[in-house]
Image (cartoon, helix red, strand yellow):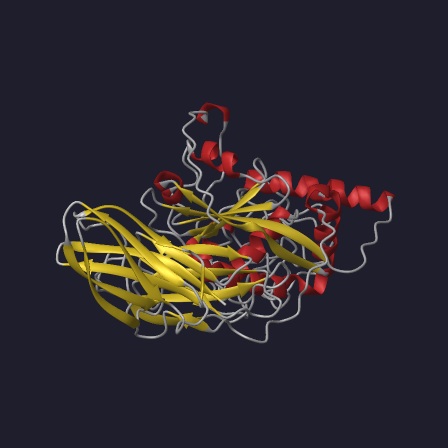
Amino acid sequence: MKKILFVFLTISALFTIDVAAQNGFCGTSIEDQIIIKERMMQNRANAALSAQVRTGVMWVPIQFHLLEDNDGGNRVDVMKVFDMLCALNEDYLDQDIQFFMKDGLNFIQNSSVNADPNHSTAPAIMVGAKVFSAINIYIVKDIPNSTPGSTLGFYSPQFDWLVLKRSQVSAAAVETLTHELGHFFTLAHPFFGWDGQYWEEAIHGNPAPISSPAGILTEKMDGSNCEIAADGFCDTKPNYGLGFGWPNCNYNGNCEDPNGELLAPGVQENNFMAYFIGCASEFTPEQKAAISADLNARTSLHTTLDPDITAFTDSPTQNSPINGEETPLYNVVGFDWEPVGGATSYVVEVDRTPTFSFNPSVKFVSGGTYIEFEDVFDPNKTYYWRVKAIKEGNVCGEVLSTSFKTGTVTGTQDIKEILNHTISPNPITSGELLNINIETNEAFDALINVYNLSGQKLKEVNTTFNLGTTNHELSVSDLSEGMYIISIESENGVLTEKVVVTR
């Protein structure tokens, strides 16, 4: 399944994006965090008035939008998306929250958005792709930043979507998505107010000032203003942006709060919202309560899904092409694999490199274990293909890859003498004769070859097609059930057709 969206409407005047790129890492702006914190406070007030008890795991739909250039290049590796989703569910498992892909992956061909999702014309494209009953996550090549550093992702409360830089899409880098989803569920930074102007003694003094550079109250170590200062949580300790540039997961600097109390060793380097990069592993109880309250309020995300989360015990066995084999055609290649128990669909990817990082093509397959790719290959070249089993509650199965070489024959009618042709019956049972009926404007000699999908030649018959109509009968009694390529080859060209043999 591939949804490619082209939106040509010029409606940028209706939209503005205010995602101030910070001096590194998270691009969710102070203005956006003000909105986020206000929503958290409202959810907190509502929760105090009504007891909301959620039992069991809540499955939350995500729609991943994979941006690519107009020519299909510069797209994130789809297998890394699955790996990231698996790791994300580990981060939220202790909250009984799990995420699943809604309707597969959505591919958007737009070079401009891929290069800059904050461009004035980007919202028109992104709104056109947005799914309103899921968390929308757009994965782009880059998020330009006007200041030094690198913006890795952001959440926009205006449009209620997340954007990730493709370098952050992997199991190893999942803390970026876990962090941005925290913003989605109303969590501000513990250093809220110090965003982009992180505490430095030479600039801000020590002890730190009563208010942050953004005018937000500076949180104190004694907890006296924790409900209103910074992120509004009392169990996230004062931070002031100390994680940015800190070289490890153990802050022992000399920063003091406005009362002169050292922040170390109370800084929570392992908090997902703190941005001590590579150190994150948990949310606090108050953060979890805020996430739960916001999820309860987002009724459009509620599902009755009860998926099969059983782990896959097998990886798909690749039947054809198998490693190193040559395909009979180069412009049409079929891929076949063994079914995996519990799988509801499969994703198949092909590319020129074993890392699938050159210009991969991808297709989703439901209800079968065979798919064809057309017009994505060059003749006589080595390619790699891999297949992954997925189901609604589990995309974490292993994936194996193998190489193959394309042939030099194209699957089109290139024989100039042929006016019309039929190959029947198709499908054909093993007890029937295959009729190859050719109408010509000139007699010619030819080879009739039969190939399996791995490119192995199984039959070769010399024949002549006379002027007018000639019918050649071919026995398939020695062919097992499956799909085959019938190739008629002459010195002037090649004609190919696929034939299915049944029992």
Give the residue displayed 63% in from the left and 38% down from the top.
35
Q: Nearer the viewer, residue 379 or 457?
A: 457
Q: Quadrant of residue 36?
A: top right
Q: Which of 412 and 180 is in front in this view?
A: 412
Give the residue displayed 51% in from the left and 73% down from the top.
315
Give the residue displayed 60% in from the left and 46% down from the top.
135
308 on left or right of 141? right
Query: Residue 208, image x and y in percent?
Result: 57, 52
Query: Residue 486, image x and y in percent?
Result: 31, 61
Residue 272 sits above or below residue 71 on the image: below
Q: In which quarter of the image is residue 501?
A: bottom left
Q: Nearer the viewer, residue 261 or 320?
A: 320
The total number of labels drawn is: 0
Q: In which quarter of the image is residue 262?
A: bottom right
Residue 281 in sight here: yes
Residue 411 sits above or below residue 47 on the image: below
240 on left or right of 223? left
Query: Residue 225, image x and y in percent?
Result: 72, 49
49 on left or right of 197? right
Give the residue displayed 64% in from the left and 66% down from the top.
266
Query: Residue 267, image x and y in percent?
Result: 61, 64
Residue 480 sits above or below residue 283 on the image: below
